[in-house]
Image (cartoon, grey):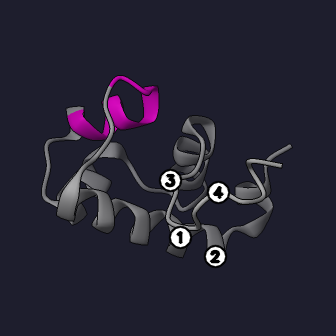
Amino acid sequence: MDKLLACPADLPSLDARSRLRRAAGLTQQQVADAIGVQYQQVYRWEQGAAEPRGRRRAAYLKLLQTLANRHPEVALGP
């Protein structure tokens, strides 16, 4: 029930983040360039070693939402 009530601004799961990026044919470097961070940061976000904050979080979330709209089959997962 908690998942149903989760804030829509929550980031996708760790697995979904990398699946969405790969479905769009993007590298971690391309995502990093779009957001304005080093590619290692995107790697850490996808691994769960760190979470984006502030403007970077908003930009990452917007990118992931756009990718999810383009690739709904990936966003829903297996």
Q: Secondary structure at mark 3?
A: loop
Q: Earlier in the sequence, mark 1 or mark 4?
A: 4
The residue that label 3 is drawn on is 11
The reply to whether callout 1 and callout 2 are in contact (CB within 8 Å) is no
Q: Earlier in the sequence, mark 1 or mark 3?
A: 3
Q: What segment is highlighted magenta in the picture?
A: 41-49
Q: How many marks?
A: 4
In the image: residue 51, left or right of residue 70: left
Q: Amino acid at mark 4?
A: Ala
Residue 54, relative to residue 44: is it above or below?
Answer: below
The residue that label 4 is drawn on is 6
Q: Residue at x 49, y 63 (%)?
A: 64
Please state the horizontal and vertical placement of residue 66, each as a whole percent of the image: 51, 75
The residue carrying pointer 3 sits among few (fewer than 14), some (14 to 19) or many (20 or more) residues within 10 Å by Cα, namely: some
The residue that label 1 is drawn on is 65
Q: Earlier in the sequence, mark 4 or mark 3?
A: 4
Q: CA distance from mark 3 to mark 2?
A: 16 Å
Which mark is nearer the camera, 2 or 4?
Answer: 4
Residue 76, relative to residue 67: is it above or below?
Answer: above
Chief secondary structure of the magenta portion:
helix
